[in-house]
Structures are given as structure tokens and as C-alpha cells.
Image (cartoon, rainbow, N blue to C red):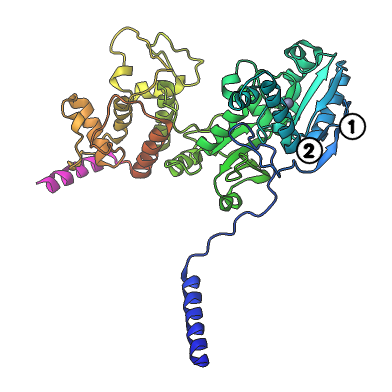
Amino acid sequence: MIAKASLRAALVFLCVLFVLLLLPQPAPAYDGPVGTAQMLVNKEYLLSSDFVGGDLVNLRDYMRVNGTVEMCRPAAEALQRMSADMQAAGVTGLSGSSGFRSYSTQVYLYQRKINQYKAQNYGQADAERLAAQVVAPPGASEHQSGLAIDVTAGGTGLTESFANTPEGKWLAEHCWEYGFILRYPQNRTADTGYIYEPWHFRYVGLPHAEYIHKNELILEEYVQKLQQEGVIGMISGQSGQAYAVYHCRDAAEIDALPGQRISVSYATTARDSYIVTTLAEASTLYDIVGHWAEENIRHLVMLDIVTGYTDNTFRPGRNISRAELVTLTARTYRLLFRPEEETPGYLPYTDVKPSDYYYANLWLCYRRGLLPRSMQVLQGEAAFLPNQQVLRWEAAEALSPLFSGFPELGSSITFGDMLNASPELRHAVQLLADYGILTGDLQGNFNPDANISRAEISAMLDRILWSLYEEAPTEEEAGEKNLQAEKENR
Ligand SMILES: [Zn+2]
């Protein structure tokens, strides 16, 4: 019996082993250090009672303090540089007043406040409610993270008047340069849950503090933006470095991120997602990673047809403007047909100057008939409206002339909302649809009056280049193709 049982066990073991070997092996999850520098702590994201901000140091060794003030070492070191630079600038009255605050201290402060209200004859529930408006409930205080500090100067105490001291003004202007943010700004009480606290600073590190400061965000908004967008590209004005800051919902994603990793921090106290800071290649377009049109956009970047913005983003969801459309169309035309360069001449637009960046491109589109009817000028002068957003029908009319010489293939693609369109537009849309350049929505509509995004136009141009590059027909070939198509249609 024993032999039989152990044989069965061995067989089961082998079967399990076999199945395990067949299963795809998941990539090992990131197991490096995870910090807390960008971690969101507030009345929604509480710290647990046993959380202690890591690597606490006595701030006495770093700056002037009142009593015993502790902070995490990286924050203390940044504070030391900040207070030294401040003194060098002639602003000398700053003292650190309150740093790390333990969970038990928070319980004590909160309970004391409740008892004060109860002494004024409030019931337990009312006393708790009132106390929570003044003192953070235990676990909700950022001070427990060891990354927050309250400062004073000139005997103002922790009051709004600190904002008007030289120290308060200097910090409001410069704290971001050292990785700090003013955590509870004026007029943001509804969003932060705290009154204006010009004395309370939170260390988040660089480049985060710079981005938060320049975009006038609160930490809640910064973390939310990262959660929504997945990645934010930024170029630090201070270091000139390009950074990509990613939000990862899973530790397994972290190792796969491109760029040189600088730090990993929990995004919130829930510790179920991460903020990963990387030093990026200057040529990276952070916000196309994983986008449906990423490959199309990369092709066009390779061909110098599209470029990103100076902050290394592409903003694929942004609607394209008329000036951008003629620029991309002209670049595509030059690549395909290599026309002789001409010195741009007069254009009949009232709001366009030869010094405009797109002038030569508009000139080319104008001369080669690569403009939708809305941008053509039949007589006199008219406005071009370079910043106006392009509609889908306009993009179709601008790009379809690239297929001139190609016949409609008479494919079965029809768009329900194009049946009553003008013959010109129907031809333009049909030609592009026949060659797979554009598609409709799930309902089979073309949506001619909708805007068109930078991603959508990029996808169209990439497909156009793919079908036409080195394949653009001569006129005779186009005639052949016409005949061929006619035969096939019969
Ligand atoms: Zn504080």
C-alpha cells in the first residue's frame, strides 16, 4: 500500500511539474528598494499605526530647530542645502518646528482635541467631527511619513502670517528647487482637506517638486495625473535632464520600463502601485508608449515627418491644427515625390506671414492642390486660420490628392453618414478608404465633422507612406491600374 501511495504521489508530482513547465513563466517582479518620497498621505490614504518614516535623523544637525525635530535623511539633507542657500541670500530667521510625528502622538493630539470639545458639552460624535476639522485623524498626518516639516520665523508661530515673512516668501518661491512643495496652498482647502498652511512643506524630491510647482498642482492632482496618463514626460529647467515618470500598477512592470531608473516610490499609502522615476533619452516620446498609434508615430519620427514637443511628449490625443496639417502633408509629399525646392511666393491669406514656420509647407500644399476646399482661396484673399482645428473631412480632402493617379477600387466600404456628402468629398473619402488609409467608427460612420487627433493623422500618413513609398505610379502606370480596376469590376 505504501509503495502504491508513494508511486501515486510521485505521478501527481510529475504531472504538476509538467504542467508548471508548460505554463508561461511570469517575469520576476521588481524586488529592489521602494521608497516613499512621492507617496500620497491624506485623510483618504492613511498610514498604518506601525508605519514609521524610514531612516529618521535629528534635524538639529542640519538646520536651526526648536526642540527635537526628526525627518527622513534625504529630506533633511535637502533641507540643509535649502536653509544654507536661504541664509546666503540674507534670509536668516528660519527654524524647523515640527517634523516626524508618530502615530501615538497623533492619537494623543486627536484625543485631546476631542476631549476639549466634550468639555464644552459636545457629545462624542459631534466632538469627533469637530476635532477632525482641526487635527488630522491618526494616520492621516503627513508628518508620520518623516517627509513633512512645519517651519516658523520671527515669532509668527504656525499662522497664515508666516506667508508674509521674508522666510515664508523665500520658501514659497524656492522650495521646489530643493524637492519641497507647499503642500496645502491657498484656496485649495476643498481639494486638500486642509486650511492654507504656508508653514507646512512636504519633500517629494526632484524632478517632481519642479513639475508640481510649475503646473500649480497639489500632490493629489499629481498622483491622479500619473494614474490616469501612466507616464509624464518632463525636462527639468534646473538640471536640463529629461525625465519620464511612470505609474505602475504592478511591480512586474517596473523592470521593463525604458530609461535609467532613478527611484521607485509607492504612489499612495495603499502600497498597491508605484511611481517610477527614470532618466530618459532626449529623443524619447514618453506619452506614446503603449498608445495604439505608437508604431505609426515612431515610423514618422524616423522619417522626420512628425516631431514631439520640447518636453519630449507627442500628445497623441491632441487635435491637429491647420498649420500642423499642412506641415505634415507637405513633408509627406516631399518624401514621396521629391519635388524641386521652390522659393515660396505670395499666398492669398490675410493672416499668414512668410516668417511663419509653416509658410513653405502651406505654399507647397497650395501649389500642389493639397488643401481641402475650406482652405482654398478661389479669388481675392481670405483668412487661413492656422490654429483652427482640422475636421476629418478636411484631412481627407487634403490627403487624398496624394493618391491622384490611383483609381477608386470600388471596395464595399461605405460610410452611412457620407451618402449625402458632396461628390468631391465622397471621392476623397472613398479613395482613402479603398486603400486602407482611413476607417470609420464601429457604427460604420465616417464622422466628417469631428476633429482629428495627432495620433489619427499620424496613422493615416504612415499608411499612406506604406502604400505609396517607392510605389507612386507614373501616369501611364496609373492608366494601367485604371484599366485593371475596370476589368476587375466587370
Ligand atoms: Zn504640518
Please state which of residues 167 and 380 is positioned toward the viewer in this rendering: 167
Query: Badge 2: few (under 14), some or many (20 or more) residues near its Cα, within 10 Å?
Result: some
Q: Is residue 193 left or right of residue 175?
A: left
Q: Residue at x 57, y 23 (%)?
A: 191
Q: Position of residue 94 (x, y in %)?
A: 85, 20
Q: Position of residue 364 (x, y in %)?
A: 40, 24
Q: Residue at x 55, y 49 (%)?
A: 250
Rendered position, 238 above or below 386 = below
Q: Secondary structure at mark 1?
A: helix
Kind of residue at disc 1: Arg
Q: Which residue is mark 2?
A: 74
Q: Residue at x 70, y 19 (%)?
A: 197
Ranked by sequence position, the earlier of labels 1 and 2 is 1
Q: Residue at x 66, y 46 (%)?
A: 260
Kind of residue at disc 2: Pro
Q: Label 1 vs label 2: CA separation? A: 15 Å
Label placed on residue 60: 1
**Is residue 310 in view from this perspective?**
no
User: What are the residue bounds of the magenta stretch?
Assistant: 473-490
